[in-house]
């Protein structure tokens, strides 16, 4: 009886093992098949820089310098594979570039300078931890130096046209000083005093030869990389149909106001729009009211219905 029971027990263990092994093999085969079927259609490749030339505002990058190549490659790779952010930039540029481009041209400045706004703010009305604001990221003092009104009700750093005009003046001024668009861009990021100090200390007058802090040392390379991608997004795998891009906010009437507006919400209702849309079209209105002193006026964009 004991012998029969032991035999039965051993036989049971054998069949249990056989069933488990068979099930596991089938499960592994199924898992492998599932992974094969659902593999992401993505290939991670390096960005080829061989026999290619790059420039910023007409100034050639010294691509024969391995350090320059590697610094540019870093920014091309980061932006190529930072999918969500770069895709949003492809969409946003259709809204903001039609405003910025003619203003740069009118000021006699290179078109490439529009990419500074991309790097500064991702084409949003951003606010930095240091206090810089708007698409062009002016600090309060610098904005006021360039005649932007900044107070508790109005902040023209958020006014696209006026901030762009101020940026044009800044860039033109410091290109006259430094004689290089790369150094001018670096000065926009670091401040002209800081760049001049590094030039004097290191004894070189080329942006690409200066050893700068990490942010400024990457700045021009980030500009060149995003320029390369936004000029031909499809070449880097970004596909946005014309109707998927963000359309320009040019469907508005201009209302000139000469009297104070205690409640902008009521002003919006008067013109048949929401308070939200009033702020979208006029982000420089930073409070719920607008005080206008005698003899002054403001132009407010009212979206068409």
Image: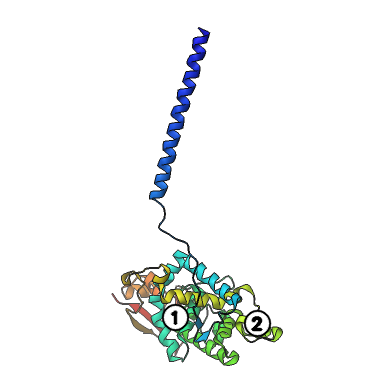
Who's the residue at 47% across and 89% down the image?
A: 109
Q: Mark 1 points at which residue?
A: 160
For marks 1 and 2, the one nearer the N-term is 1
Mark 2 falls on what kind of element? helix
Q: Mark 2 points at which residue?
A: 194
> Where the C terminus falls, by quadrant?
bottom left
Give the residue at the far front of this rendering. Answer: 51
Front residue of 69 and 252: 69
Residue 265's x, y, as percent? 39, 71
Give the residue at the far right of this rendering. Answer: 201
Q: Give the colouring mode of the picture.
A: rainbow
Give the residue at the far left of this rendering. Answer: 305
Residue 253's x, y, as percent? 32, 81
Do the residues under discs 1 and 2 have CB atoms within 8 angstroms? no
Residue 161's x, y, as percent? 44, 83
Who's the residue at 45% across and 69% down the image?
A: 86
**Residue 75 is at least partly visible in this image:** yes
Residue 274's x, y, as percent? 35, 70
How far apart in space, not on screen, are marks 1 and 2 (Cα)? 27 Å
Front residue of 5 and 75: 5
Q: How crowded is mark 2: few (under 14 residues within 10 Å), some or many (20 or more)?
A: few
């Amino acid at each position: 009886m004991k012998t029969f029971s032991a035999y039965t027990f051993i036989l049971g263990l054998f069949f249990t093992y056989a069933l488990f092994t068979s099930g596991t093999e089938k499960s592994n085969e199924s898992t492998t098949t599932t992974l094969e079927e659902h593999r992401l259609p993505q290939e991670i490749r390096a960005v080829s820089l061989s026999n290619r030339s790059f420039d910023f505002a007409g100034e050639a990058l010294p691509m024969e310098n391995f350090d320059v190549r590697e610094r540019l490659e870093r920014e091309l790779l980061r932006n190529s594979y930072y999918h969500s952010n770069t895709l949003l930039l492809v969409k946003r540029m259709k809204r903001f570039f039609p405003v910025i481009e003619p203003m740069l041209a009118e000021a006699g400045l290179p078109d490439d300078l529009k990419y500074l706004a991309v790097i500064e703010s991702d084409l949003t009305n951003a606010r930095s931890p240091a206090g810089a604001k708007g698409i062009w990221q002016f600090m309060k003092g610098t904005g006021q130096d360039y005649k932007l009104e900044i107070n508790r009700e109005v902040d023209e750093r958020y006014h696209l046209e006026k901030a762009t005009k101020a940026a044009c003046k800044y860039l033109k001024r410091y290109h006259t000083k430094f004689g290089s668009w790369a150094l001018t861009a670096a000065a926009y990021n670091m401040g002209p005093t800081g760049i001049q100090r590094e030039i004097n200390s290191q004894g070189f007058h080329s942006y690409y030869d200066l050893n700068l802090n990490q942010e400024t040392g990457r700045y021009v390379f980030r500009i060149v990389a995003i320029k390369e991608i936004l000029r031909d997004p499809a070449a880097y795998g970004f596909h946005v149909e014309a109707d998927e891009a963000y359309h320009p906010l040019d469907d508005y009437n201009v209302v000139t106001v000469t009297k104070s507006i205690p409640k902008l919400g009521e002003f919006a209702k008067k013109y048949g729009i929401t308070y939200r849309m009033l702020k979208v079209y006029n982000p420089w209105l930073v409070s719920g009211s607008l005080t206008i002193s005698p003899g002054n006026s403001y132009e407010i964009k009212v979206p068409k219905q």
